[in-house]
Image (spheres, rainbow, N blue to C red):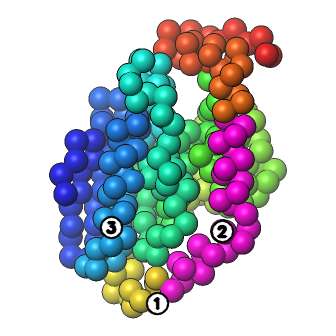
Amino acid sequence: MSYEFITTEQRGNVLLVTMNRPEVYNAVHYPMHVEMSDCWDAFAAAEDQWVAVLTGAGDKAFTAGNDLKYTASGAPDARKGLPPKGFSGLSSRFDLEKPIIAAVNGFAMGGGFETALSCDIIIASEQAKFALPEVKVGFFASASGVQRLSRYIGRLAAQEMMITGRTIMADEALKLGCCNEVVPHDQLMDRAMELAAEIANVSPSSVKATKRILNSMAVADGLPESLDYSREVQTDLAKTEDFREGVQAFVEKRKPNWVNR
């Protein structure tokens, strides 16, 4: 299928998906969310696509996350929020029975990190950087960052990252457990496709069965309900002066003036 903000390429039984807005560091706006959600729907239905690799266009960014400038632009769909399946069509998707490898080629910030965490395996370039910096602009990591990071790396380390919004480099991400592997930048896509081919060589039915159980575990842990609550809290946060100030300060490239209300 043809998209405006992402590209897709099938290589054997592997689907390569590239977030393709390099001029804004592959930041995701509402039209791109919709395209990505549609892409994953098609991937789920395709009998000859057994595993996917997700990456970002260019050498600087996997994705910068939420496109705040678009959010503040006044575009008709800028305030629509997320599609039903969540950020990048992934963060609230609990029925996909095929694995996705995130090939993180640069910084993965906010919703970009949440997108990677919503994948099954994360391979990072040595140039990759990770952060949930939403608190610096009046948001919080409501697209599964709070839930997934605290599950994957432990609550204490996750709390520090989420509350400070600090950025970690690829080597620290590996030590904390934020990614599976770090490779030289020029070897990232080769390694991701090699791993995808390895997965494509095992029984796709067995992989689907494994993911079915993993999905059921996430549901049993209450992850869908927790994400619903995150959206409620985000709605309340959006009514605060600090939220409006954070977005405006980001657009104006200045330090926010927080008022705690």
> How far across and down, in percent of the image, does residue 67 sit?
44, 30
| Residue type for callout 1 | Ser
* Quadrant (top left, top right, bottom left, bottom right) of the C terminus: top right
Q: Which residue is at the front of the view, 54 or 73?
A: 73
Q: Secondary structure at mark 2?
A: helix
The residue located at (70%, 28%) in the rendering is 237
The residue located at (30%, 35%) in the rendering is 22
Q: Which residue is mark 2?
A: 218
Whether residue 31 sits left or right of residue 117 in the image: it is left
Q: Secondary structure at mark 3?
A: helix
Label 1, label 3: how far apart the Cα atoms are: 17 Å
Tell me the magenta residue range: 209-234
1 or 3: mark nearer the eye: 3
Classify residue 148 by image quadrant: bottom right
Classify residue 183 by image quadrant: bottom left
Q: Which mark is residue 43?
A: 3
122, above or below 136, in the image? below
The residue located at (44%, 52%) in the rendering is 89
Circle 1: is it few (<14), some (14-19), or many (20+) Cα within 10 Å?
few
The residue located at (35%, 29%) in the rendering is 24
Q: Is residue 231 visible?
A: yes
Q: Which residue is mark 1?
A: 206
> How far across and down, in percent of the image, does residue 77 sit?
40, 30
Label 3, label 2: how far apart the Cα atoms are: 21 Å
Q: Is residue 106 visible?
A: no
> How far across and down, in percent of the image, does residue 19 sit?
33, 46
| Residue type for callout 3 | Phe
Q: Which residue is at the front of the view, 80 or 59?
A: 80
Q: Which residue is at the front of the view, 84 or 108?
A: 84
